[in-house]
Amino acid sequence: MRDPNPAIRLKKPFLLVLKRGSLRFAPKKNTKIKGLTPLPMHRRLLTAKAPRRDGFCSLRLGVLAVFPFLLFGCKPDGQAEFPPFDGRRAFAEVEALVKITPRDAGTANARKAAEHIRQRLESFGVAAEIDTFNDKTPDGEQTFHNVVGRIPGKTDKWIILGSHFDTMPGIKNFQGANDGGSSTGVLLELARMLAGQRPRVGIIFAFFDGEEGIADYGPNDGLHGSRHLATTLVETGKVKTIQSMVLLDMVGDKDLHFTIPFNSSRTLVKEVLDAAHAAGHRDRFTLSLGMVITDDHQPFLDAGVPAIDLIDFRFGSAPGLNDYWHTDADNLENIGSQSLETTGNILLKLLEQTALD
Ligand code: 1BN
Ligand code: ZN
């Protein structure tokens, strides 16, 4: 069911808003802010029951079920059981992407990275295309390239799994192994695993260009790729077929800890926590009641699509610090395949519960 994500009146006096690279405090109490979910619901989420599970492998699927059954097997409740996510494969995808560095939007390397991602998807048997478009930036009009891969489902519903692949401009020796690389590696490996499946809900793998801003201000700075896809879905009327949008960002920190920002849909927060619990990683999540992050999930929230940002915003040299973020320390040495594996397994559980049954 669609989560309307209504504007609410905040009771908390301050809200930390992380917006396009700047830290600022939101207006004081009783400020109407779009796209936020109320505090009490977050509390209730912690005790919510797991959703009903149904049979992806049920006999109703008949002969068609045999192939995925042989590949993945079935659990006693009839649900598809996937092999564990292989973090080393995902890491190899990050390594391959990071060879194309930097990947700043509007550069030849961004185009090269998009083509690389498209080719990886096609090599897995996932139909993929590059969506090239122009958008205004503080530096004038620029060309961007989103990559979109699709695994059609048995219904006309879709879930979007998103990652950006561009790098933050202006940082010397910046690889973006975590910021842009890690989430792309996880989604590519997930696409490889799910290729050939016929899920109940179709899966769109969306790799966004132009997530990073240039100047940290203005409505046309950053989130170019996600805004373009969300706007296109609205303009074509297809937005009603989008069940949800799950964004991954900075999921490679060796000390993985997700802080789900306040501007995430409560229905999805519950589903993700259920999935994390089922995968044995519930302790890696904190729900942030006071932090809003303007990330690639935001245009989907604005379009009325339930969306969530799975981000580890403590990427640093010591627990709690985020001092590697947007620095040359965001490199392959500082991310771990284990964290990619953890993220992949949580996503698989989420899909089992919401899309594959
Ligand atoms: C995440 C990684 N983001 C940028 N690189 C989104 C973001 C924007 C996070 C502003 C915090 C503040
Ligand atoms: Zn960034």
Image (tube, grey):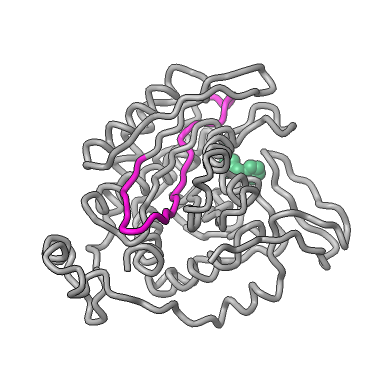
Position of residue 226 relative to residue 214, above or below, is below
Residue plotted at (25% across, 36% down): 122
Q: Examine the rendered structure and indicate whether residue 273 appears above or below residue 332.
A: below
Q: Residue at x 37, y 47 (%)?
A: 187
Side of 338 where 267 appears, left or right: right
Is residue 325 something one can see in this rendering?
no
Residue 183, can we see it? yes
Q: Which residues are magenta?
A: 149-172
Q: List the single residue furthest toward the front.
A: 237
**Quick one: quadrant of the C terminus?**
bottom left
Residue 259 image position (x, y, % from top left):
58, 59
Question: In the image, is 61 to the left or to the right of 266?
Answer: left
**Front residue (pair 92, 328):** 92
Which quadrant of the figure has residue 149?
Answer: top left
Query: At x 55% / y 34%, what residue is drawn?
Result: 228
- Give the residue displayed 26% in from the left and 69% down from the top: 56
Q: Is residue 156 magenta?
A: yes
The vertical placement of 20 against 13, above or below, is above
Q: Residue 174 in the image: state x and y as whole percent.
A: 50, 30
Residue 31 is inside the magenta segment:
no
Q: How many marks?
A: 0
The x and y percentages for residue 272 are: 48, 66
Residue 47 position within the rendered picture, expressed as x and y whole percent measured from the top left = 55, 82
